[in-house]
């Protein structure tokens, strides 16, 4: 069994890494070989480290994270400052390497779905190049319904399948959480995989217990 997903979010800082790590832990708990990939990281390797810690198979770091950019900027700008050009073919090649090592692969995108990666390509192009079903993390805060629906529309416009969505309450003061989740259920037309309420100390292992794996 080989499953691979592209994990995107309604924005940066919405819980993608937390959810990616939790999905990997959930898959590992089911006896699957679970592996995360972060093709483009900008401004630090925390996401890469979190995915590596959550997976249960070893893989070459340069395949797990082909591009580590120094500055916390949009990837196309961070890459320019580092004097590199992000090449989707290199990422696709690295992805193929990883694919053989795992049963369950999660590829965490940078930022939101249409984040520019270079002058030529963006996150949607990467997801389409890899040809993966997409899991959407909705960061529950005011404005998230619009961002979630726009992202779902963009995913489907690329001919990609929205394999599921997870709501993560990044804002402890978010009002009407249940009603917002109900609005997502009614409008996203994709499987809900879980709702992660605000946690003082977010822990992927605990979040894993609240998620269903996408199919
Ligand atoms: N449900 C939640 N409860 C509390 N904090 C959360 C929750 N989801 C995400 N966070 C926190 O929000 C920040 C951004 O989450 P992260 O997973 O790094 O987002 P992304 O990968 O989308 O940038 C992190 O500090 C994370 O721990
Ligand atoms: Mg992240």
Image (cartoon, rainbow, N blue to C red):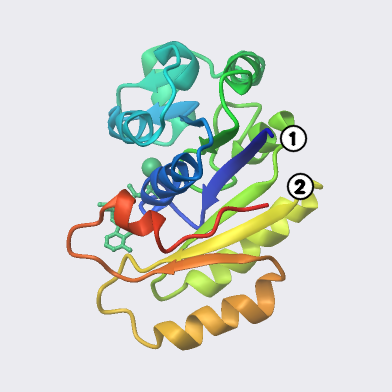
Q: What residue did someone put label 1 on?
A: 131
The one nearer the camera, 120 or 126, is 126
- Ligand 1's image quarter is bottom left
Q: Position of residue 86 (x, y in %)?
A: 54, 19
Q: Position of residue 153 (x, y in %)?
A: 71, 60
Within the image, what quadrant is residue 141 found in?
A: bottom left
Is residue 14 something that shows in the picture?
Answer: no
Query: CB at mark 2 closer than 8 A to ligand 1?
Result: no
Q: In this image, 98 relative to 74: left or right? A: right
* Secondary structure of the residue carrying numbered label 1: loop
The residue most toward the front is 31
Q: Residue at x 67, y 60 (%)?
A: 152
Q: What residue did someone put label 2 on?
A: 160
The residue most toward the right is 159
Q: In this image, 161 relative to 165: left or right? A: right
Q: Residues within 10 Å of mark 1 (few under 14, many from 20)?
A: some
């Amino acid at each position: 069994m080989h499953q691979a997903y592209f994990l995107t979010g309604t924005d940066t800082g919405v819980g993608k890494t937390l959810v990616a790590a939790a999905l990997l832990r959930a898959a590992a708990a089911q006896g699957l070989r679970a592996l995360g990939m972060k093709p483009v990281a900008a401004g630090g390797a925390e996401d890469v480290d979190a995915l590596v810690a959550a997976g249960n198979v070893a893989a070459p770091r340069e395949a797990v994270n082909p591009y580590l950019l120094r500055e916390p900027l949009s990837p196309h700008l961070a890459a320019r400052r580092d004097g590199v050009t992000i090449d989707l073919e290199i990422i696709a090649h690295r992805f193929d390497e990883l694919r053989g090592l795992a049963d369950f692969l999660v590829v965490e995108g940078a930022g939101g779905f249409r984040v520019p990666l270079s002058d030529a390509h963006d996150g949607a192009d990467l997801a389409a190049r890899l040809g993966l079903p997409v899991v959407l993390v909705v960061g529950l805060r005011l404005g998230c319904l619009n961002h979630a629906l726009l992202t779902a529309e963009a995913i489907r416009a690329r001919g990609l399948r929205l394999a599921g969505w997870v709501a993560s309450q990044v804002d402890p003061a978010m009002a009407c959480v249940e009603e917002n989740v109900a609005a997502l259920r009614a409008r996203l037309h994709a499987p809900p995989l879980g709702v992660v309420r605000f946690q003082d100390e977010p822990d992927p292992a605990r979040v894993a217990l609240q998620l269903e794996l996408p199919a």
